[in-house]
């Protein structure tokens, strides 16, 4: 894609969020995370590992989004998302779980959609 900047890195690397923020060159309208940890087959472990990635992405979004921006992140059902949901509700005007039509009914995959970022000065992790 002409003009595209490609960064191949581990987002959990301490320098990764800063490198990505610099590559953006400004505040984005949307932060979208489709990150998921490799699954182990142990539902609770898979949920916790993917929730960690979702929390890291949310923290990044809170630092870079422009006011009115949106955040969408993959997670797995499992019950450990209450702290993240609370944080998102403090920082966005609406927060919802969404399950895409392409996702199988038996799949634990779902997305958190946070709309209309209130702007800097609210809380983060």
Image: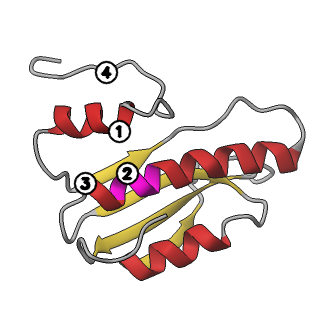
Nearer to us in this view, 33 or 86: 86
Could you say which disc has been placed on residue 1 in the image? none
Q: Is residue 2 left or right of residue 56?
A: left
| Residue picked out by circle 3 | 64
Residue farthest front in this picture: 14
User: Real-space Cα distance between discs 3 and 2?
Assistant: 6 Å
User: Real-space Cα distance between discs 4 and 2?
Assistant: 16 Å
Give the mark, 4 or 1, whose residue is nearer the N terminus.
4
Rendered location of residue 23, percent (x, y): 18, 31
The residue drawn where x is 62% and y is 49% is 52
Rendered location of residue 94, percent (x, y): 41, 80
Mark 4, other Cα within 10 Å: few <14 / some 14–19 / many ≥20: few
Asked if 90 appears above or below 39 in the picture, the reply is: below
Rendered location of residue 108, percent (x, y): 75, 52
Task: Answer whether labels 2 and 1 touch (C-beta < 8 Å).
Answer: yes
Looking at the rendered structure, the secondary structure element under dot 1 is helix
Asked if 4 appears above or below 20 in the picture, the reply is: above
The residue drawn where x is 78% and y is 42% is 46
């Amino acid at each position: 894609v002409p003009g595209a900047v490609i960064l191949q890195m581990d987002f959990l690397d301490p320098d990764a969020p800063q490198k990505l923020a610099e590559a953006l060159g400004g505040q984005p309208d949307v932060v979208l995370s489709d990150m998921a940890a490799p699954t182990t087959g142990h539902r609770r472990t898979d949920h916790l590992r993917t929730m960690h990635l979702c929390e890291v992405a949310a923290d990044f979004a809170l630092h870079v989004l422009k006011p009115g921006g949106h955040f969408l992140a993959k997670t797995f059902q499992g019950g450990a998302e209450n702290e993240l949901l609370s944080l998102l509700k403090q920082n966005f005007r609406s927060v919802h779980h969404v399950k895409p039509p392409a996702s199988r009914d038996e799949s634990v995959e779902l997305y958190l959609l946070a709309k209309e970022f209130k702007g800097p000065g609210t809380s983060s992790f």
